[in-house]
């Protein structure tokens, strides 16, 4: 069984994944896979440099904040970034899911699960949902960026409203971490009950 886990930036996806990882649930993380294709000398990194300029590279290594600034400067640039990276990421995700061995479930964590139709690979989807003001505050604190950049990133994403319509389960993350952890554990228990019911 594959659960697609998604949510806006800084909504709490990684936090949710680390809670699940502690329960030995295998995680396929689209962000980690995305990083693999931007390792030094990777052909996809070369394509990015051709499209966005060599200044995204410092001694052959991707400067993520420069690429982010350039990519989020316009919707055209976001599309360009996606057209270069997404097909390669999709392939790597498919093989990671195929190689995941578990008798419980595997989580596919992907910020752009719906936008890239990765939900089609999943049996159920979970949306981690936080209020935009909290997303902005968490981005500013975590990434040390200014408020305007944080809002630009949040506003460039598919609105939460739309994701809520597409998700099977919505897990709110507007309160303290302990409450969030409990919500994740509740969903985990619910899935395991369903799996054991199916097996009986
Ligand atoms: P991204 O899309 O950027 O990868 P994400 O959705 O994985 O982000 P996290 O990294 O899990 O989000 O959370 C963003 C930041 O907010 C982290 O610094 C995390 O520790 C913090 N955070 C998450 N949930 C809470 C919470 N309930 N209370 C306080 N801080 C939180």
Image (spheres, grey):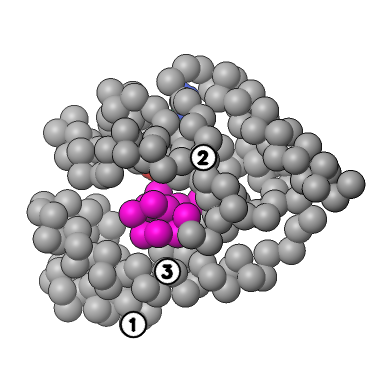
Q: CA distance from mark 3 to mark 1?
A: 13 Å
Q: Secondary structure at mark 3?
A: helix
Q: Secondary structure at mark 1?
A: helix
The span picked out in magenta is 109-119
Residue at 47%, 64% in the rendered image = 33
Report if residue 156 lies within the magenta region. Answer: no
Q: Quadrant of residue 26?
A: bottom right
Q: Secondary structure at mark 2?
A: loop
Depicted 110 relative to depicted 168: above or below: below
Q: CA distance from mark 2 to mark 3?
A: 24 Å
88 or 161, which is in the foreground? 161
> Does residue 32 appear anywhere in the picture?
no
Depicted 145 relative to depicted 30: above or below: above
Depicted 100 relative to depicted 160: above or below: below
Q: Which residue is mark 3?
A: 89
Count the labels in the image: 3
Q: Which residue is mark 2?
A: 168
3 sits left or right of 13 in the view:
right
Residue at 39%, 27% in the rendered image = 130
Q: Is mark 2 within 8 Å of ligand 1?
A: no
41 sits left or right of 72 in the view:
right
Q: Quadrant of ligand 1?
A: top left
Q: Quadrant of residue 1?
A: bottom right
Looking at the image, is mark 2 or mark 3 nearer the viewer? 2
Q: Which residue is mark 1?
A: 43
Q: Earlier in the sequence, mark 2 or mark 1?
A: 1
Q: Residues within 10 Å of mark 3 (few under 14, many from 20)?
A: some
Q: Is mark 1 within 8 Å of ligand 1?
A: no
Q: CA distance from mark 2 to mark 1?
A: 36 Å
Image position, residue 185 (x, y; %): 67, 30
Q: Earlier in the sequence, mark 3 or mark 1?
A: 1
Q: Earlier in the sequence, mark 2 or mark 3?
A: 3
């Amino acid at each position: 069984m594959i659960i697609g886990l998604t949510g806006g930036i800084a909504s709490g996806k990684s936090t949710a994944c680390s809670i699940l990882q502690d329960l030995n649930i295998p995680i396929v993380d689209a962000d980690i896979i995305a990083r693999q294709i931007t390792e030094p000398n990777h052909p996809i990194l070369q394509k990015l440099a051709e499209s966005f300029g060599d200044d995204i590279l410092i001694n052959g290594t991707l400067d993520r904040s420069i690429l982010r600034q350039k990519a989020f400067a316009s919707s055209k640039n976001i599309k360009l970034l996606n057209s270069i990276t997404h097909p390669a990421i999709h392939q790597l995700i498919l093989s990671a899911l195929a190689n995941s061995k578990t008798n419980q479930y595997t989580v596919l964590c992907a910020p752009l699960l719906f936008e890239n139709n990765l939900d089609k690979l999943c049996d159920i989807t979970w949306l981690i949902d936080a209020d935009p003001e909290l997303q902005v505050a968490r981005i500013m604190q975590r990434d040390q960026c200014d408020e305007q950049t944080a809002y630009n990133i949040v506003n460039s994403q598919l609105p939460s409203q739309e994701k809520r319509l597409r998700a099977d389960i919505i897990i709110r993350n507007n309160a303290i971490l302990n409450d969030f952890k409990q919500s994740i554990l509740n969903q985990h228990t619910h899935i395991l009950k369903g799996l054991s019911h199916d097996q009986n």
